[in-house]
Image: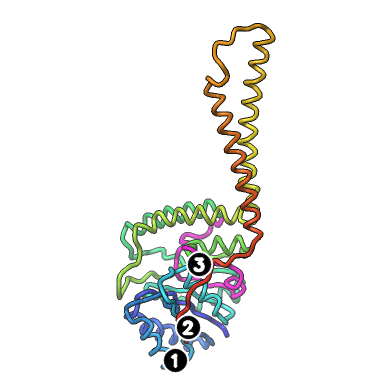
Amino acid sequence: MDISVVVPLYNEVESLPELTSWISRVMQENGFSYEIILVDDGSNDGSWDMIRRLQNNNSLIRGIKFRRNYGKSAALNVGFEATKGKVVITMDADLQDSPDEIPELYRRITEDKYDLVSGWKAKRHDPITKTVPTKLYNAATRRMSGIKNLHDFNCGLKAYRNTVVKNIEVYGEMHRYIPVIAKWAGFTKIGEQIVEHRPRKYGKTKFGMSRFINGLLDLLSIFFVGRFGKRPMHFFGTMGVLSFLTGLIIAIWMLADKLYSLSHHIKITRDVTAQPLFYIAIVAIIIGSQLFLTGFVAELVSRSSHDRNNYQVEETI
């Protein structure tokens, strides 16, 4: 199969007929073998009933329905697991992504040998409350990840080599940073393509101010996991040792200073325990010990297998 199109959706019943018809037309015009995987993330507006009707008319449409709303990352992760095409295209269901971009995205993966090509909506039809945070996060992500050639990490329209989606894990709300996850997994040939950003035709945006805080937390999380996820002791252990040694050196210096004063009969104006440095030393030693133990426990946890992507799928067609 040439292409798998993965579409995560939540309450997008009005746009689905037009979107799937548009994707099918583009595929047929270009002679692609394809599948459309619609992942219903717990919609309550009749989206699943619409997917059923569309699947009855087109056997190349597949549907996955979550029992409740888990978020876009969960929908993408489950959709990736279900793909069969050698190139995987992701796009949003709100018709703001144009399926006409698919042939060029496919060409860049198959001919230019990119692992991942991310869309860049250079001209956006979003309010300033959405565009300003997006620019800030993109700038911060470029700096922290080292992926300097991407302008829009969170664009829903992306193309992947199949081996990429089968070897990365998207959880929480990490869909914003899939290029970073792919880079940490060893897929370093990442490109960008300017794509059309269409005005929303149906429904309403799912963007809220809570995503502003979540985006920052996710950025810090993906940076830490990418750098130290497999070796947490390198982070916690280093910080712990530095803190412990700092406190120990201060304590030794204070003890040596007191012994020197006693041996030379120098009058001691105040006790060691009355000095602020004494408490700073104690706190530094305690924090250092705790950080070291945290690193040790985290090292044990990282060596244990765990299932972060266990989602309740109610129905699959």
Q: Which residue is mark 1?
A: 58
For marks 3 and 2 on the same chain, the one whose residue lies earlier in the sequence: 2
Residue 13, located in which quarter of the rendered image? bottom left
* Disc 3: CA contacts within 10 A as few (<14), some (14-19) or many (>=20): many
Q: Where residue 315 appears, x then y in whole percent?
A: 46, 83
Verify whether residue 156 appears in magenta. Answer: yes
User: Circle 2 sits in a helix, a strand or a loop, which is it?
Assistant: strand
Verify whether residue 88 appears in magenta. Answer: no
For marks 3 and 1 on the same chain, the one whose residue lies earlier in the sequence: 1
Q: Are the residues flagged by discs 2 and 1 in contact, CB closer than 8 Å?
A: yes
What amino acid does circle 3 point to?
Ser
Q: Where residue 18 appears, x then y in whole percent?
A: 36, 83
Separation of disc 2 and disc 1 at Cα? 10 Å
Q: Which residue is mark 2?
A: 36
**Magenta stretch secondary structure, dominant:** loop
Q: Nearer the viewer, residue 292 or 34?
A: 292
Q: Where residue 68 appears, x then y in whole percent?
A: 41, 73
What amino acid does circle 1 point to?
Asn
Q: Which stretch did the figure color magenta?
A: 146-173
Q: Where residue 290 appears, x then y in whole percent?
A: 59, 42
